[in-house]
Image: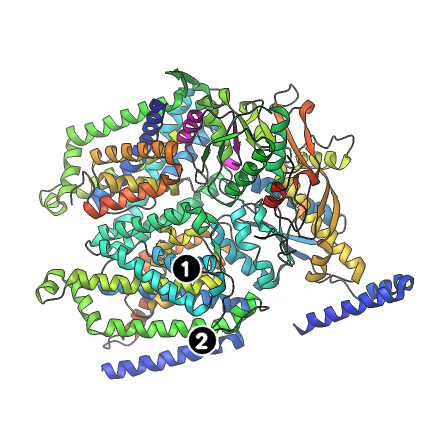
Amino acid sequence: MGLIYALNGLYFAAFLFLTSLGLSIILGVMGILNLAHGSLYAIGGFVAAYFIGMMTGSPAVLMLVTAAAAAMVLAGAVGLVMETTLLKPMYKRPLEYQLLITFGILMLIEDLIKLVFGGESRYASAPFDAMGSIEITGHTYPVYFLFVMGITALAGLFIWWLMAKTKLGIMLRAIEMDRDMAQAMGIPMRRLTVVAFVLGAALAGLGGALVVPTTPAVLGMGMDVLIMAFIVVVIGGLGSLKGTLVGSLLVGLTRSFTVAFYAELEMPLLFMIAVLILVVKPEGLFGQK
Amino acid sequence: MAQKTNRRQFLKMAGAAGLGAGAVSVMGTKALAAKKSIPKTPIKVAAISFLSGPAAGPFGIPGDNAYKMMADVYNKQGGILGRKIDLISLDEAGGAKTQVELARKLILEDKVDVILGYISSGDCKAVLPLSDELGGLMLAYDCGTHVLMEGKKSPYKTPKFQLGFRTSAHLGQDNIALALAIKKYMPDVKKIAGINQDYAWGRDSWHIFELAIKKLLPQVEIVKTLWPKIFTTDYTAHISALQGSGAQIIHSSLWGGDAVTFIKQAKAAGLFKQAKMAMSRGEPYPQELGAEFPEGQFLCCAGAHYFLYPAWDKWPLNKWFVSEFKKRYGKYPTYPSYHAYQAITAYKTAVEKASSLVGGWPTMEQTAKAMGNLSFETPSGYCVINKDHNAREDCLVGISKMTKDYPFPILDPQRLEVFPSFQVNAPAGLTTEEWIAGWKS
Amino acid sequence: MTNYLFSSRALGYLLALIVLLLLPQVLSPYHLTLVETGLSLAIMALGLNLLLRYAGVLSFGHGAYFAAGAYAVGLLNMYFPDNFSFELAMLASLGVSALVSALFGFVCVRHTRIFFSILTLALAMLMFAILEKAYHFTGGSDGIRIPLPTFFGIELTGMRRFQFLVGPYYYIVVGIFAAATLVMLAVVNSPFGKALQATRDNEVRAEMVGIRVKRFRWYAFVISGTFCGLSGGVWSFVNGHITPEISGWVFSGEIVYMVLLGGFMIFEGPIVGAMLFTYLRLYAVAWTEYWMLIVGGTLVLLVLLLPGGVTGGIAGLAARLRPGRGGGRG
């Protein structure tokens, strides 16, 4: 049973990783806590559910790839519009405006989703059902969960490669470390900021796309995710890839084991950890101040 | 205010006249009825259900659709006492705080004639007291928490609210019926676990089920109780915990998207190989999930609300309701649709009854008085609203089974258990807990 | 100049008070309950603005102290129903919120900027999680009903809440609101208020001239939190029911919304904001299913086009109409 608890934790961590990474990048590079980040995840979920619904009867992997691609493109596009029109004028404004505008965007997107997709939940479980289950040490385990972990690992590797090995990544990290210095060095801030934002949005969209085969896409699905991602970012550290990974694992595993052994503590414990880290090391485990 | 008092005095006088004059009063009432006119304006009826969010698909929309259908049907028959029903559908989303604010507006500013609403038990607990506090007639139509109408101590004050009603039976009946069905079909069960949402509905459902099952089957051991947050999307951790507990039966009052998500994830994780579900309001989910829904699970229907029960040849009203609903919305009605029928029909019946007594269009208080002791036919049989302002119904528990007639499992017609209302509902004045404690197993 | 300003402000306040006291003669009962809601929330908005405008830090978790005040009332009723009097309830909400904000504030004031906001947000969510999970002590997500209290020994049995709300309670709310406004005005104009602004403008320089920055910020935090608590206590009777969502981040965000809607650069701005927000949100909810589009759209437009809020916009307009004279800011 312990192995299964650990697998569940890893699975949950995989989702958190995808959805928190964008939040973390945006916070790290732009210094904005994007409250609308969960809504990008919700867009991904609804778009993917729509596509999976359209493709009933196709092979599971094809459905998933199409849905995930569509979700990433759309969430990325919404991110692009949001960044270039609404957020751009905010970078020089005080904190309260930055936070509030993302709060406003969150409300707008929630209702726009309702306008476009209707208020009802959207089921899209065909890929989940099609993949079935396998036996792991005598316990049945859904293949789809393993699939999600695999995809997340790939996405994580890709981001790591991008950040560590490409010029783009190096410039992004330079901005995170010292914005003014980076600007002085002639790094094209504006273009990079857009790239980082769209990347984060697309990852959130991917997270949403991967979740809908297991649970219907519903209005408000972004809210809970935002809170969980917030905890991860606070624990791991703003803008740190390593931090997001560690934070996701910590939150995922903590949740899985508290539910198994002392379910009452689930949420309070996670917030307690977050507050403790904020008090002791406000920049998070791996973040730079 | 002054007008109200006048009317009340008038009513007293009318009542005294009626009593005193005996047989002559028949003519008297008629004269009164003729004298009191009925306004021509439409009746403002606010129907509040979840129209968006996770509870919209399985509850709010089937409920709201039934409201729309019945308002339409009644309007075609001439409305209520000749007045058309002007139905305003409103969204229950936004949490208890928003609902309290909305109800305050509906009663004080919009002055609606009646509010038919609320699916969430949390919303009911927050909003129903407003009926008396602000002076507005309110019929809770679907929420289940038993403490809504029951007091803390027995005998409790009945009715708890003068102008607040619930036109369906509370969760006591679902969970007691489930326990009775388990006793019949699995009398040797040893280990039972529960997964219920962390709010009034889940907490109270489990509380009553635990009391009833322990009384009926004393050998049962409760091996795990889980309280996921409402609208949880990932149940993997909970499912593993349930598997680890070795439970044979898992009691659950999960509803809506939560129920769907849980069943899907549990099926893939193999939970149903070792355990059966006992779902206190499981009736809508086979239709929702289709052939994916596992067979052999105990499903309660929140009353006797099922599209195949009562049998169509015995109870034509069910046939009419199901066919009309299917014709309009392309789906079979689920229990929230039946509950919506009960609410709007309870209002109509009570207004007509009050009017036949006092003549003219009855005041809110007169309608409430008439509703406090009301019985009427519904597509599921009879609904009785008791003096505690809470309805009583028979309760149906079935076991899911795939047949060739429907693309989803139905309740096995060979194993339909219908428990009469007195067997699953505490009598008025006694709390459900005390009633169960008094059973001689 | 100051004297002139002060007297014109005093005159304005007196007028406003008279208008408020006369409202029951003209407004429908329903609107009175809305005004009550607005006034009780205004106390909280004033509290938040002490931190935002004068201490220069943004709390995105002030719902926690509002909830502390409201739950103090709720729990008092739950556990001591026989001693449920209004004066005790108010004392409890003041005391509990002061305590909670002193505790939470102690850890928060060591940070500024986004870290301060994140920490306040996390603490509010911690409070939320505890209120929601401690089902047996707090009623969990169902919350607690707030019945009518006794009032200095006067029993209100037999009175409908509605009559209470549009009758005596209206004047109580106006009274508490007026007192709170005057106290806050005194605070921001006191030497303490000036010192606080110095810490906002330049932390290092303030430290150099001997202001104990963190200590001062902490005091401000406690005052601010206590205002929120009082607001929560007063509001709980208006609403009649409290749930943990008032400690959630959405409500905390709405508080900031109110302050910015009214305009945080002008002392009275948050009051205007709380009132406007109450009306905006409720009418949007009642008018359309897509109310978030309205409330959210208003917020986005506000941030983009009217950063000074409504009062800021009016002051700006007035200043433009009368060139050469500054507006009465402060």
Q: Residue A127 appears at what percent x and percent y?
A: 44, 23
- Residue labelled with disc 1: C70
The picture quadrant where one finds residue B86 is bottom right
Q: Residue C218 appears at what percent x and percent y?
A: 22, 61
- Chain at numbered mark 1: C
Q: Residue B112 appears at what percent x and percent y?
A: 62, 59
In this rendering, the answer to whether C10 lies above or below A254 is below
The picture quadrant where one finds residue B40 is bottom right
In this rendering, the answer to whether B216 lies above or below A56 is below
What stretch of residues is rendered in magenta?
B233-257
Q: How is the image coloured?
A: rainbow
- Chain at numbered mark 2: C
Was residue B245 drawn as part of the magenta stretch in this picture?
yes
- Residue labelled with disc 2: C20
Q: Is residue C314 left or right of residue B365?
A: left
**Which quadrant of the figure contains the N terminus of chain B?**
bottom right
Residue C96 appears in view: yes
The picture quadrant where one finds residue C259 is bottom left
Q: Residue A236 appears at what percent x and percent y?
A: 23, 38
Asked which secondary structure carries label 1, the reply is: helix
Residue at x-position 35% and y-position 71%: C180
Q: Nearer the viewer, residue B44 or B367?
A: B367
Instruction: Give the number of marks.
Output: 2
Amino acid type for the residue under numbered disc 2: Leu
